[in-house]
Image (cartoon, grey):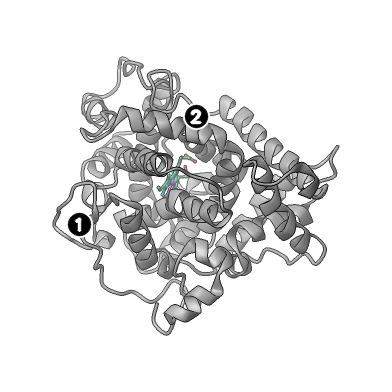
Amino acid sequence: MEGLSRRRILLTGGAMGALGAVSMAAPAQALTAWTWSPSGSVAGSGSGIDPRWVWDEAADPLLSSLLDRGAVPEVNRLLWDWTRNDQDLPAGLPEDLREFMAEARRLPPWADRNKLEVAAEFNKGRGLYLNLLNGVGGGMLSTAIPKEARSVYYSQGGADMEDRVAKTSMLGFAVGDLNAYRPGGTVVVEAVKTRLVHAAVRHLLPRSPGWSHTGSGQEIPISQEDMLVTWHTLPTFAMRRMLEWEVPITRDESEAYLHLWQVTAYLLGIREEYIPATWEAAYAQSDQILGRAMGPTSEGVELTDVLLNQLAEQTSPPLGVSRPLCNALARHLVGDQVADWDAIPREPVWDPLVAEAWPLLVKFREKLIPLPMVPEVAWTIDEAARQYILFYLTKGKETRIQIPVANRP
Ligand code: HEM
C-alpha cells in the first residue's frame, strides 16, 4: 500500500476497485504488520497473532503421520464414496483420522441454517456469474498470487491442470449448489477433504526442489494468511464485482452470502479469529493482505495459459468461441493489472466488445434493462460461460478430491 494514495486507488476503478487496494507499485513484497483486529472476526476476540505464522495445528501433524505411515492410498480409497454431508464416515479409516474428521465435519455453533438457505437461493439466481467470478475470475487471480501459483505448480496436481481444475471446481460448485449445506449436499465433504489435502501439501511441498527454490522464503506453504488471501479472491472479490455491476442484492442476501463463506472458511480450517464477521471487516482484511500477496511469476503465467486454453477448448465449436474471447473475458473479470501479471494477451477486437457487452448482459439478467439493449455478442459470452460451467460440472462427477502422496514429478 505504500506510495498508493487514496485518490489513486479511487481513480484506478474498474476491476482494481473490485480487488480493493491492490498495490501496483510493489507486487507481492511490501509486508506490513498484521493489524487486522480479531474483534472484527466471527470469534469476536483472539490472540491477534500474525496469520503468516499459523497453519493448521490439528490437521498438519495428522497428515504428516498418515503420509509417513503410508496410509494415504488406502484412506483415499475409503473416502472415494464418502460424498454427502449426512453420510457416515466409511468404516476402516485409521482411528486418529476418524476422530479428526468427526470433529472437522461439524458446523460451527454460530452456523445459521436460515442464512445458509437464503444464500443457497441467492447462489441459484446468480449462478452464472458467480461461477464465472469464482471459477475463471478466482482462477486468474490465484495464478497472480505467487505463493499459490508456485504451490499449485509444484504439487502433484500441477502436472494435470484439467483434473485439478475439475477437483477444485467441486468445492466451488458444492458451495454454490442449492443443497450446499443441506443433508444431501456435498460442501462439508469437499471442504473437509480439501483441509486434508492442504495439510498433506504442507508436509510434501517443502521436499520439492522446485518449490523450495521459489517458495518466497516460506518454509511451510498454505499459512492461515495464504488461506485468507485466497478466500478474498472468492466471496470478497465476487461481492465487490457484483456491486460494481449493480446487481441488486438485498441486505439479507448479502449477509447470507458472507455467512455461507464464513462457514466454509471454518470447515477449511481457517481459525475463527481470522474469519471476518462483516463485509466491512472482510474488505478491510482483504485490503490489507490481498494486494501485497499478488504479482507475476513464470509459474503463474504458465498455469494461466493452460487454464485459458482449457476454457477455449471447452467453449469452442459450434459457437466458434475462441481463445481471444476467453482472453478478453478473463481480462474483463480480473482487470488489466492482474491480466498483465498473468500475461493474458490483449485482444484489440474482443477486449472492448466484452467490456461493453458483459455489464449489459448482467443488467438484462437482473431485469434492469430490456432485451434490445443487449448486443448480440453478449449471448456468445453467455453461452460460453454456460458451457464452461457444464464442462466442469460433468468432469466433477467423474473425479474426487484426493490427498496427494507426492509432489509434481
Ligand atoms: C488443493 C481449494 C487455499 C494450494 C485444493 C483443492 C481445493 C482447494 C478444492 C482440492 C483440489 C485438488 O485436490 O486438486 C482452496 C480454497 C482455498 C485454498 C477454497 C482458500 C479459501 C489454498 C492456498 C494454497 C493452496 C492459499 C497455496 C498457497 C493448494 C494445493 C493443492 C490444493 C497445492 C493440492 C493440489 C494437488 O493435489 O496437487 N485447494 N484452496 N490452496 N490447494 Fe487449495
Q: Quadrant of the N terminus?
A: bottom left
| Towards the viewer: 242 or 143 | 242
- Where on the picture, by quarter, is residue 347? bottom right
Q: Position of residue 60 (x, y in %)?
A: 26, 44
The first of marks 1 and 2 along the sequence is 1
Q: Position of residue 162 (x, y in %)?
A: 62, 41
Is 174 situated left or right of 309 in this image?
A: left
Q: What residue type is labelled 2?
A: Asp
Residue sitting at x 47%, y 49%:
234
Q: Where is residue 173 in the image (x, y as percent from the top left)?
A: 52, 34
- Where on the picture, by quarter, is residue 340? bottom right
Badge 1 marks a residue whose secondary structure is helix
Q: Position of residue 75 (x, y in %)?
A: 36, 26
Is 64 situated left or right of 191 in this image?
A: left
Q: What residue type is labelled 1?
A: Pro
The vertical placement of 272 against 389, above or below, is below
Residue sitting at x 76%, y 54%:
325
Is 56 situated left or right of 250 in this image?
A: left
- Where on the picture, by quarter, is residue 103? top left
Residue sitting at x 57%, y 30%:
396
Viewer can see residue 250: yes
The vertical placement of 292 against 187, above or below, is below
Task: Indicate which disc residue 38 carries.
Answer: 1
Query: Distance between the Cα atoms at labels 1 and 2?
Result: 30 Å
Residue that protrudes farthest toward the bottom in the picture: 3
Query: Residue beneath label 2, please?
Result: 177
